Image (spheres, coloured by chain):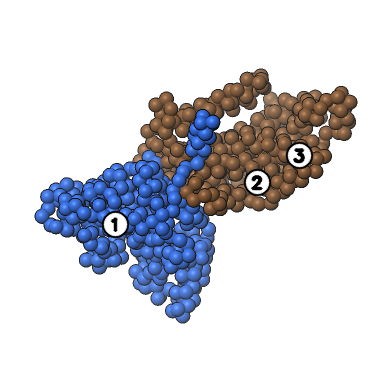
Chain colours: A brown, B blue
Amino acid sequence: MKPSFRHRPLDWGRANLFSSPANSLLTVLALALLWQLAPPLVGWGVLRASWGAGDPETCRQAGGACWTLLTEKHRLMLFGVYPYEQHWRPLLAMALFVALLATSANRRFWRPWLAALWLLTVLGIGILMWGGVLGLVPVETAQWGGLPLTLVIAVLAIAMAFPFSILLALGRRSDLPAIKALSVGYIELVRGVPLVSVLFMASVMFPLFLPEGVTIDKALRALVGMTLFTAAYLAEAVRGGLQAIPRGQFEAADVLGLSYWQAMRLIILPQALRLVIPPIVNQFITCFKDTSLVTIVGLYDLLAATKAALNDPGWRPFFVEGYLAAALVYFCFCFFMSRYSQWLERELNRDRR
Amino acid sequence: MKIAQTLVTAIVGSVLALPVMAGATFDAVKAKGFVQCGVNLGLYGFSSPDDKGNWTGLDVDVCRAVAAALFGDANKVKYTPLSAQQRLPALQAGEVDLLARNTTWTLTRDTANGLDFTTPGYFDGQGFMVSRKLGVTSAKDLNGATICVLPGTTTEQNLADYFRANKMSFKLVVIEKNEELNSAFFSGRCDALSSDASQLAGVRAGQASNPDEWVILPDLISKEPLSPAVRQGDPQWTDLVRWSQYAMVYAEEKGVTSKTVSTALKSPDPDLQRLLGVTAGNGKALGVDEKWAFNIIMQVGNYGESFERNLGKDSRLKLERGLNALYTNGGLMYAMPPR
């Protein structure tokens, strides 16, 4: 029984903050800590902070947080080395991306045309970023950077890794020895090495095996590396779901005369996938944050672009502000993903409550 | 069949950047119309993107100079930012035509790694920074000192070698992150900070609350001649890069800057006439336009201009010329005669 004191703050406080001596002590300690930390933080971040345009000297004199850094450097941090005059293109591409994700998040739009919409939007984003048609100046992937690059790599890697991981998970549980061995071998091999070394192989070793002078686009290499890596981990999450489905469901599907693929598509996977939403989203979030490792291949993702902005000796003392801003962006995306997964879980598992 | 072939070529062509054959780098670069230049991911003063994402720096200027010599346009460069581990394989595999990424010229790299170094563009060396209050004037006074360094075999190795050779002892504090290392030093965790002298100046300019309280000791304990490098096997390409660098130094020796180069065309000095292509010959020998050096100086500037803009008094680093002054001013910068 949950007492509901919502409308009476005093009762709420008694129930939640001072319900036992131990809890009371913890509450007091937490308040004391807040009392100690809050004033200097506010002083640094707000009262003594410098805002708006300026140079490092103004920040140094103000003595507080240097948000001026963001005013001066936000375009380098957000867009990396993408040509300055063309920044509206990645900006528009990001807006399209966010709109696409928002649309896909809504259950009402889960119709076949959504796949077509994805294809169209990704194509549109590609045209915007690459250019070369419709009078847009061509921009190579080597010049892509900042948040758009992070989003492109993360979203495409996730979108491609997910179907691949389902195949891998099914393969691992397959009765066909060759397919099973291949799936197990792949998953164990990829899980056995860190992402850094996968990317490193892709960027340093791989070109040495190619014929002299032939190079493969760096962003593509990073994207493929991320996809292969994420798929192996996702496959294990999906396999967990498959194993949780009772035998009876498989037998029932057989009795109905469904083929293997029909049974998987109509009966097993819908149940299995909704069971493993938390670990899947977990992997999505990891993948999103792992994009910061593509700097190894020489690409400027959001974090690398932030570092590039902080490379200027004048601004170097204010690295905390730069990293805070980058962290906030990462947090926004990851927090959205985790909240969305919670909602999705409630929405899809209504019958189980 | 023909259509299928065209289609395959188009698809492959969009993914693969073809081809830079060994021994024909010069022709390949000329044919594709730009120089693919390997640079540092971000090292202020040598190569880093500015606020607008444009590449700037002393190394970047070498790339621009080569493009100006070959194409008459310093902007015909594409940059490939490379990490320290990536840089040599990238050059060997032909991903870049030219590596201008603060790379020390060593025997191993010049031979076993299959590279050719052109000529040093910056003479660096490992040095020490200490607090002025410490009263230390030479690295020899650092016996027993605690020294902060970034991890990395050469920095630590140089330190160990130097202190052993001078029969001194020291304590090492190794910190992985640059910012942490520097704040550890400035907060007094170590007596001295050791790194390449050019780096120390940047740290002092950027992170010290009062730069005047810190001194960089005059002793350098290692040789770090930073030089652009190319793949072995195409002497014409090596020559072009090397002479593009010499042209910048020679222009400084002759006092020609980007502002005065137009009037210098009328100079009666035969050396200048040869350099600037008034007297033909050099361009033909290099396989480029006779105006090659003129274009470099006009669009990139002479070595001194490049130095001051990126590292010296017009930059945030405020580095002294030191070893990188002209040989006439006590430095090591000496251009071979372009004749």
Who's the residue at 23% across and 59% down the image?
B338
Q: Secondary structure at mark 2?
A: helix
Q: Quadrant of residue A285?
A: top right
The three-letter amino acid code for the residue at tag 2 is Leu
Residue B42 picture location, percent across and down: 43, 50
Q: What residue is disc 2 on?
A: A29
Instruction: Tell me which chain the residue with mark 1 is part of.
Output: B
Q: What residue is disc 1 on?
A: B243
Instruction: Tell me which chain the residue with mark 3 is part of.
Output: A
Q: What residue is disc 3 on?
A: A171
Q: Comparing marks 1 and 2, which lies closer to the viewer?
A: 1
Who's the residue at 37% across and 43% down the image?
B31
Question: Is label 1 in contact with label 2 (beta carbons under 8 Å)?
Answer: no
The three-letter amino acid code for the residue at tag 1 is Trp
Q: Quadrant of the C terminus of chain A?
A: top right
Residue A101 picture location, percent across and down: 59, 27
Compared with A31, B229 (above or below) is below
Same-chain status of marks 3 and 2: yes
Q: Residues within 10 Å of mark 1 (few under 14, many from 20)?
A: many
Compared with A316, A3 (above or below) is above
